[in-house]
Image (cartoon, grey):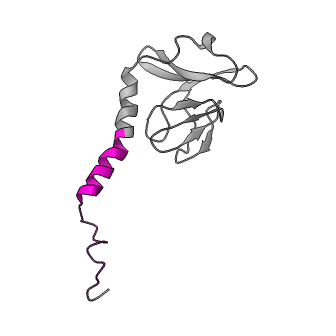
């Protein structure tokens, strides 16, 4: 607590390095890219295009919907915005879930949280 340490500069909370700035920008580009997806068209035009085990983002006016058919063929429609910070989720066909590219949350086809940091399910369509 008192005195000096050779590690003081390394652990100084106010330190700023060029490498850290590059890492900060690179890691936050994922969030910027995800929010830019709100302007893009949907991945599917109609939920009728989806076969069992498939999912995609559907545009509904100004909203984006996460549309998928579970392996039993039931259609699930939810808000495509992650309930954590609002990034758009992407369908993971291998694991049959919705993945958030920003912070790693995973959601079941019915919108339930599988892994956080999200604690609330995907919103209703």
From this viewpoint, which residue is outermost toward the front?
Answer: 19
Q: Quadrant of the N terminus?
A: bottom left
Q: Can residue 100 be seen in this view?
A: yes
Quadrant position of residue 106: top right
User: In this orientation, which residue lies closer to the viewer: 62 or 42?
Assistant: 42
Q: How many labels does the image show?
A: 0
Q: For the point 26% across and 53% down, which residue is it?
A: 21
Query: Would residue 78 be found to the left or right of residue 17 on screen?
Result: right
Q: In this view, does 8 lie above or below 116?
A: below
User: In this orientation, which residue lies closer to the viewer: 17 or 82?
Assistant: 17
Q: For the point 51% across and 32% down, which residue is it?
A: 89
Q: For the point 76% across and 23% down, which residue is it?
A: 72
Is residue 107 one of those drawn in magenta? no
Q: Quadrant of the C terminus?
A: top right
Query: Would residue 28 be found to the left or right of residue 99 on screen?
Result: left
Q: Is residue 31 above or below residue 15?
A: above
Q: In this view, does 8 lie above or below 118?
A: below
Q: Can residue 67 be seen in this view?
A: no
Q: For the point 63% across and 29% down, which residue is it?
A: 93
Image spot of residue 75 (x, y percent): 66, 19
Image spot of residue 80 (x, y percent): 50, 28
Is residue 13 one of those drawn in magenta? yes
Q: What stretch is highlighted in magenta?
A: 4-29
Q: Is residue 68 above or below residue 81?
A: above
From this viewpoint, which residue is outermost toward the right?
Answer: 72
Image spot of residue 98 (x, y percent): 58, 33
Image spot of residue 68 (x, y percent): 62, 23
Quadrant position of residue 110: top right
Query: Would residue 60 be found to the left or right of residue 27 on screen?
Result: right
């Amino acid at each position: 607590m008192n005195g000096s340490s050779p590690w003081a500069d390394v652990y100084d909370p106010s330190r700023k390095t060029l490498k850290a700035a590059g890492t900060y920008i690179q890691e936050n580009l994922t969030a910027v890219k995800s929010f830019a997806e709100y302007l893009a068209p949907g991945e599917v035009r109609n939920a009728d295009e989806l076969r069992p085990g498939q999912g995609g983002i559907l545009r509904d006016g100004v909203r984006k919907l996460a549309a998928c058919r579970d392996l039993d063929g039931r259609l699930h429609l939810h808000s495509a915005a992650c309930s954590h910070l609002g990034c758009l989720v992407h369908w993971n066909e291998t694991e049959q879930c919705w993945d958030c590219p920003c912070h790693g949350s995973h959601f079941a086809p019915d919108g339930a949280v599988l892994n956080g940091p999200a604690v609330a399910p995907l919103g209703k369509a």
